[in-house]
Amino acid sequence: MEIKLSELEKYLEIEIPAGSENIKISGVAPVDTAGKTDITFITGEKFLKKLENSNAAAVLIPKGFVPPDNIIPLYVDDPFYSYIKVLEYFSPRRSADIASGMSPLSFIDESAELGKDVSIAPFVFIGEGVIIGDNTTIGAGTAVLKGSSIGSGCLIYPNVSIIDRTSIGNNVIIHAGVVIGSDGFGFYPYKNTIVKVPQIGRVEIGDNVELQANTCIDRAVMGVTMIEAGVKLDNLVHVGHNVRIGTNTVLAGQVGIAGSVMIGKGVQAGGQAGFAEHIKVGDRAGIAGQAGVTKDVPPGIIVSGYPAKEHMKAIKEEIHIRNLPDLKMRVKELEKRINELENKE
Amino acid sequence: MEIKLSELEKYLEIEIPAGSENIKISGVAPVDTAGKTDITFITGEKFLKKLENSNAAAVLIPKGFVPPDNIIPLYVDDPFYSYIKVLEYFSPRRSADIASGMSPLSFIDESAELGKDVSIAPFVFIGEGVIIGDNTTIGAGTAVLKGSSIGSGCLIYPNVSIIDRTSIGNNVIIHAGVVIGSDGFGFYPYKNTIVKVPQIGRVEIGDNVELQANTCIDRAVMGVTMIEAGVKLDNLVHVGHNVRIGTNTVLAGQVGIAGSVMIGKGVQAGGQAGFAEHIKVGDRAGIAGQAGVTKDVPPGIIVSGYPAKEHMKAIKEEIHIRNLPDLKMRVKELEKRINELENKE
Amino acid sequence: MEIKLSELEKYLEIEIPAGSENIKISGVAPVDTAGKTDITFITGEKFLKKLENSNAAAVLIPKGFVPPDNIIPLYVDDPFYSYIKVLEYFSPRRSADIASGMSPLSFIDESAELGKDVSIAPFVFIGEGVIIGDNTTIGAGTAVLKGSSIGSGCLIYPNVSIIDRTSIGNNVIIHAGVVIGSDGFGFYPYKNTIVKVPQIGRVEIGDNVELQANTCIDRAVMGVTMIEAGVKLDNLVHVGHNVRIGTNTVLAGQVGIAGSVMIGKGVQAGGQAGFAEHIKVGDRAGIAGQAGVTKDVPPGIIVSGYPAKEHMKAIKEEIHIRNLPDLKMRVKELEKRINELENKE
């Protein structure tokens, strides 16, 4: 796969140096590993020196910077964004790698409604009344149960389980092994037994959401568990029943969210962070990896540790703890000195 | 779907007010969102005021309480339990949403023995000598390997993997993506390699167990990994080899249990709690979310933190830590005062 | 299943006592549960007493030790290793329990290349250009996407998802529900949206690796996520993009590894440990369960806690924290004494 710089000029809506139109680019790579036909990028001054030893053919570079003579400068507003666009151009994957066309080895209930150019791999199960939008692709072994709907332009990888009456928006990416709409964890102790609270609610997934491998999203007891547009959940994330996750919130691997937690918009959480049930996390809050969030987090605040507290406070406490041996020595010293003072009297 | 109060009277074994027999109920909802044909519930006095603004048609209510005139009181011993029963009545899901009848697109080994009214979805694999009880339902893409047995009345959702020689009791619910009977994590360093310890044991799952999405239960090295009757495991729980979990124990999402841990009856653990190998947890112990349990927990004791300790002790330590800046100031002040005393001499 | 001691003599390359050749062994068990036809083992002197009450027929025992008269001693260099070999002999599982022969109910793309004696269960999807080595077995519902390759002698359990262009070595064991090659978690905030960074790299898995149930390994942004030979990952482990895990490293259940982490050879990590992105962990380092590793760990060092620090240091801090009530009392006492001293003047 190749692209001429003259084509890249149009694709990225940039201006390339005169005379470089016919240079061919065959790949994208970081500054230090880029080969002679690769394009690379730098985002700031401190990377300019690295560029001197780079073999790259061309560099996506902020305006005002001058690369070495042997590397063609491609001036852009946001080099990382342009780099993503070039990566997209070279990306060999997507729907064609998952399925192409309708496999006769799938099962599609006769009541299901499929849009145009839907691709369905072998061993996919599409249940009663399921609706699937245009250009959506579904991988081998995925099951979509009764009454669920999936929007257009979605990519559903293999072995995904979408339980009944789940709604999924447009341009959603769901990686292998994800489970959406399994029962919430609701039980009630009654006369020496534990009675199951029926989970009769649903899950709604907004547009442009991405759910990574083996992540689980429980259906609501009643009402809906809501994953709003643009949310990104990493691998092995657990979302309990009746949770709401706001637009563009990004949660890293193995985050766990207990029932009825409300997470705002634009929140970011590190891996293995946990949220206790019924708490509220404000917009744009930041949650450190492994934080154990046991109470509400105000908007924009960063918390860490267990139980989670404001990150600067947690760091100060950590320093105090680290200085405990010193504090103990000082107390010991004081005791010695006061003994001496008392003895003198 | 609708139910007349006269029918509900029989279903719940209660007495309804005279004249309300023909009132129709079409759903169940919390006090604040209930509509005009919904039934709701309150469990205590503090919710009575909320009821004043509720649109509910009827309320499940403890004896002795009086709701507003426009809401029909349905007196019950345990309103939450009765609410569960009504939820069950309205629950649209269950076996019919997973599979109905025997799909010709499944693979069932000729040596397998299936009970009456078993339902098997497309792309289910049933291996050699597998036994399945009456009224059990198995979802699309699930695999049940050689020599396993599943009791009656079970619901197995899609894409579950039940590895060979697993025994599953009656009325067990297994959500999508669960793996039962995969190898335990047993390795032995030998002459610069790591040798696998064959895991030749099995898994046994008691009656009325519920395993939620993507949970994994390892088979024993030798003998059995035992999940006793009534145990409930949330999503993404990890159970190591030779673990035993006692009756009616309830473990929340992403709990991790290392090999040979013995957990008693009626234990409750919060999300992401972890148990180190070979420890014993007594009956009715409580384990806080994210607790790292590194040694035995006596019966009835609540522990939290890492390493886990009695919860009250952990809270006191937390307060001591929070007061460290103050303690340091006091030591500093003491140093100043003692300096002054010493200088005076 | 049975084995005569004369056969075991050859199998283990040991010498058995004269006259015991025709004794038949039917199983392996720990000292305290071994029956009359079982073989057991002890690794050291402290287990000799246990042996006195054992019913075992024979014992794998270090040279120089003498078991009770009724138990035949089988002298070996490393009793635990010999016990593993006997377990292997009696192990009823392996490829035949997963699949035997090529199922006509699988889908194998005509461009795929399969070696000799490959077994493929029903509902397996093998995509375009996939290569599979000799004697490899693939369980029901597993999907192997376009351009991936799997070596010889591998065991792939049911419902595994191997995403496009993944390379897997020889003698690799992959348990049910594992996902290999799903996208890394790469996103870039751009003008109020979150743009996906295409993940165009791959995953490589070395020889003799074992991946346990529902573990997830992300493909690289560019380049490769590398799991080197002999690595063992327990259930529900999360491996981010561009991670490298060195030879013979062993990571317990629910460990989480953020993007671009470099883990050395022979590292061991306990359950639920987490690694922050871009850090380096040296060869033979030890990471305690639930440790939150936020910076590089030197070779051979053991760390624990959050943020992770050298284990001995963490233990000392823990003791200091436990002694805080005492320290506070001492400060209080000092204040009292200094008050008295000041008042005397």
Image: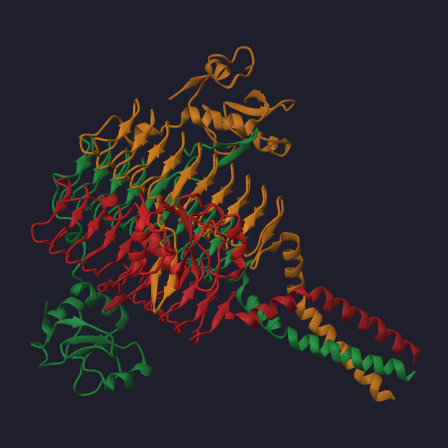
Chain colours: A orange, B red, C green
Left or right: C89 in relation to C187: left
Left or right: B160 as drawn, with respect to A168? left
**Residue extending furthest toward the front:** B19
Q: Position of residue C183 (x, y in %)?
A: 40, 38
Q: Is residue C340 visible?
A: yes
Figure check: A205 above or below A216: above
The answer to whether residue A19 is above or below residue C41 is above
The answer, for residue C263, to whether it is visible in the render is: no
Q: Residue at x 7, y 76 (%)?
A: C22
Q: Is residue B31 above or below residue A164?
A: below
Please identify the quarter of the rendering in which residue B1 is found. Answer: top left
**Can you tell which quarter of the image residue A140 is in?**
top left
Taking depth in this image into account, of A135 and C4 the one nearest to the observer is: A135
Q: Quadrant of the N terminus of chain A?
A: top left
| Front-most of residues C308 and B247 | B247
Total numbered badges shown on the rendered structure: 0
* Foreground pick, C233 / B178: B178
Place of residue B173 in the rendered image (x, y in percent of width and height, measured from the top left):
28, 55
* Image coords of residue C228 (percent x, y): 36, 49
Quadrant into which the C terminus of chain A falls: bottom right
